[in-house]
Amino acid sequence: MGKDVIVACDFPNAEQTLAFLDKFQGRKPFVKIGMELFYGAGPDIVRQIKARGHKIFLDLKLHDIPNTVKKAMMVLRDLDVDICNLHAAGTIRMMEAALEGLTRPDGSRPLLIAVTQLTSTDQESLEKDLLIERPIDEVVMHYALNARKAGLDGVVCSPLEAGKVHDVCGADFLTVTPGVRFADGDVGDQKRVMTPAEAKKVGSDYIVVGRPITAAEDPVAAYERCVSEFIG
Ligand SMILES: O=C(O)c1cc(=O)[nH]c(=O)n1[C@@H]1O[C@H](COP(=O)(O)O)[C@@H](O)[C@H]1O
C-alpha cells in the first residue's frame, strides 16, 4: 500500500457516516472506523463501508491481557479490514498474541500497527500523568522497537516522530500519523501536530485526518487539500 490520506470517520451512527461518504461521489477515500462509530453502529458498518469499495483502518486500540486481545483479534480478523491497531503499552507479549489472533488459518491477515504515545499527549502529561520521565520521542522509539520485535507492521505516532521511527525501525516499517492540521486550522485536543505538507517531508506513510475534513464547510475540498499537500 502506498502513501495515502486516511479519513477518520468519527460519527456516532451509520446514517451520518454514509451521508458523509456520499459527498465524495466517485472517490473512495481510505476510511478509519474508530471507537465512536464502531460502538455506535456495530460491526455491520465495517461490512457496509467495505462493500462500497473503501479500504478500512479499524482503530479500536486494543489493550488488555494477551489472551483477551488474541481472542478479540480472532473476531476482528473476519471483518476483513486492511489495518487494525492496539496499544504498544500492552507489552511485547500482548502484541505477539494479537498477531496470532489476527492471522487467518490460510496465513493472511490485516496489517497490525501499535499506538506508541497518543498525539494528544505532550511532554508534560507524559511526566505528570503517566510518570514517564523520559523525552517523548525516546519513549515513542522504544515502543516502536517493541512493536517491531513483536513482528508488527508499523506504528501510530505523530508525524513529528515519523522520520526517526523509519531511521530506527527501517524504511518499510509503517508510520501512520494522526495529529495533522492545516497551517491555518484549529489544533483542538491534539498536541504533537504537523501539516500534511510537513508530514510528507518527514516521510509519514499515511496521515490520519478527522475534524479538519469532517467539520469543514466543504469536506471534499478539505480532503483534496490534504491529498495535494501530502501526495502532491
Ligand atoms: O490510533 C489513532 O488513530 C489515533 C492515535 C493517536 O495517537 N491520535 C489520534 O488522534 N488518533 C485518532 O486519529 C483521529 C484524529 O482525528 P482529528 O483530531 O479529528 O484529526 C481520531 O480518530 C483519533 O482517535
Image (cartoon, rainbow, N blue to C red):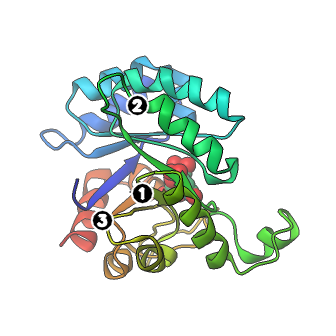
Determine crowd level at label 2: few under 14, some 14-19, many 20+ residues with C-alpha closer than 10 A.
some
Kindly check if marks 1 and 3 are in contact, taking CB atoms under 8 A apart as contact. yes
Which mark, by number, is residue 209?
1
**Label located before the other in sequence (1 or 3):** 1
The correct choice, above or below, for 18 with respect to 78 in the image is below
Q: Three-letter amino acid code at disc 2? A: Thr
Q: Nearer the viewer, mark 1 or mark 2?
A: 2
Residue 32 placement, left or right of 64: left
Which mark, by number, is residue 72?
none
Identify residue for label 3: 226
Q: Nearer the viewer, residue 174 or 179?
A: 174
* Residue 182, percent from left and from top: 41, 72
Residue in view at x 66 percent, y 28 percent? 67
Which mark, by number, is residue 103?
2
* Residue 112, percent from left and from top: 44, 45
Query: Which element type, helix, strand or loop, lies under badge 3?
Result: helix
| Whole-number angstrom distance, CA of label 1 to CA of label 3 | 8 Å
